[in-house]
Image: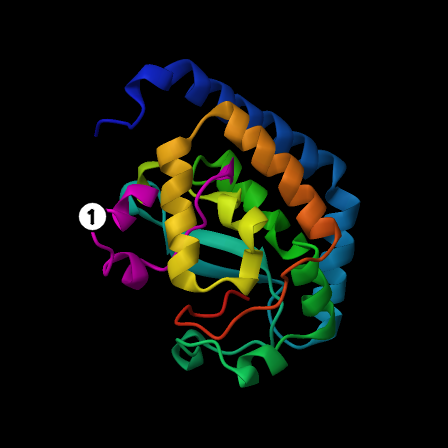
């Protein structure tokens, strides 16, 4: 399948090199932090340490995204499809802290090293959401999904899903290494300040 941005092969190669290098460092140097978070998640409530969910990746290909669990565990068939106040109340104490600082996303270094995700890119959505995309919205699938995104610096969880998707499409349309650097720098400040960390009620299935 033809990749997007045929004139930016070198930039895409540099992007992938950054992904592999940065995540290799995080995976090795961050082992004590990973272990601490895993222990806190285990102690916070019964259930698995990790939460995995099928998401739509590059060109809509499904993959298993992995995160630290931040909510009370429930079987897949009992997971709701809308975000409500009761879902917010299901977030554990440690889960709330992990979400605020984006630490629940750390296990996604595995997805990045496997080539399923990138450090920066459109946030991956559920396959059933992608199935309803119009041709313009599907452009967000022309790049690998990322942990950090343009939406993260434009409002994070405080903006509605439709606007988030519009920002994901804008990212793909405007993509460059310079844009990635801008997002990386600004996203770090957004996370450290815990800005817009509260989830809106929306049609997204909660991402534990």
Is residue 43 positioned above or below 20 on the image?
A: below
Number of labelled discs? Answer: 1
Residue at which label 1 appears: 135
Q: Is residue 70 left or right of residue 2?
A: right
Q: Quadrant of residue 58?
A: top left
Q: Position of residue 75 (x, y in %)?
A: 46, 77
Q: Nearer the viewer, residue 188 or 89?
A: 188
Is residue 200 positioned above or below 30 on the image?
A: below
- Residue at 75% in and 62% down: 39
Q: Is residue 176 left or right of residue 60?
A: right
Split into 4 quadrants, where in the image is the C terminus? bottom right
Q: Position of residue 81 (x, y in %)?
A: 39, 75
| Magenta-colored span | 118-140
Split into 4 quadrants, where in the image is the N terminus? top left
Asked if the stretch drawn in magenta spans residue 44, the answer is no
Is residue 8 visible in this depiction of the protein? yes
Q: Position of residue 189 (x, y in %)?
A: 71, 45
- Residue at 50% in and 44% down: 150
Q: Quadrant of residue 78?
A: bottom left
- Residue at 44% in and 35% down: 115
Q: Residue furthest bottom?
A: 86
Asked if the stretch drawn in magenta spans residue 129, the answer is yes
Q: Nearer the viewer, residue 177 or 76?
A: 177
Q: Position of residue 185 (x, y in %)?
A: 66, 35
Q: Is residue 18 left or right of residue 203?
A: right
SS at mark 1? loop
> What is the crowding at mark 1: few (fewer than 14 residues within 10 Å), some, or many (at least 20)?
few
Is residue 144 visible in this depiction of the protein? no
- Residue at 74% in and 50% down: 192
Is residue 125 positioned above or below 18 on the image?
A: below
Is residue 67 positioned above or below 198 on the image?
A: above
């Amino acid at each position: 399948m033809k990749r997007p941005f045929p004139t930016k092969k070198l930039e895409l190669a540099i992007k992938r090199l950054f992904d592999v290098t940065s995540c290799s460092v995080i995976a090795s140097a961050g082992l004590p932090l990973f272990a601490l978070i895993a222990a806190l998640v285990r102690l916070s409530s019964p259930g698995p340490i990790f939460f995995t969910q099928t998401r739509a990746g590059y060109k809509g290909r499904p993959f298993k995204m992995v995160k630290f669990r931040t909510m009370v565990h429930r079987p897949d068939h009992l997971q709701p499809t809308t975000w409500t106040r009761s879902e917010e109340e299901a977030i554990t104490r440690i889960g709330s802290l992990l979400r605020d600082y984006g630490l629940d996303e750390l296990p996604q270094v595995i997805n990045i090293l496997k080539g399923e995700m990138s450090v920066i890119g459109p946030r991956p959505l559920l396959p059933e959401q992608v199935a309803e995309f119009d041709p313009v919205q599907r452009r967000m699938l022309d790049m690998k999904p990322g942990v950090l995104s343009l939406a993260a610096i434009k409002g994070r969880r405080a903006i509605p899903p439709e606007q988030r998707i519009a920002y994901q499409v804008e990212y793909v349309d405007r993509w460059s290494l310079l844009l990635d650097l801008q997002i990386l720098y600004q996203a770090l400040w957004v996370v450290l300040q815990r800005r817009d960390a509260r989830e809106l009620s929306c049609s997204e299935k909660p991402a534990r």
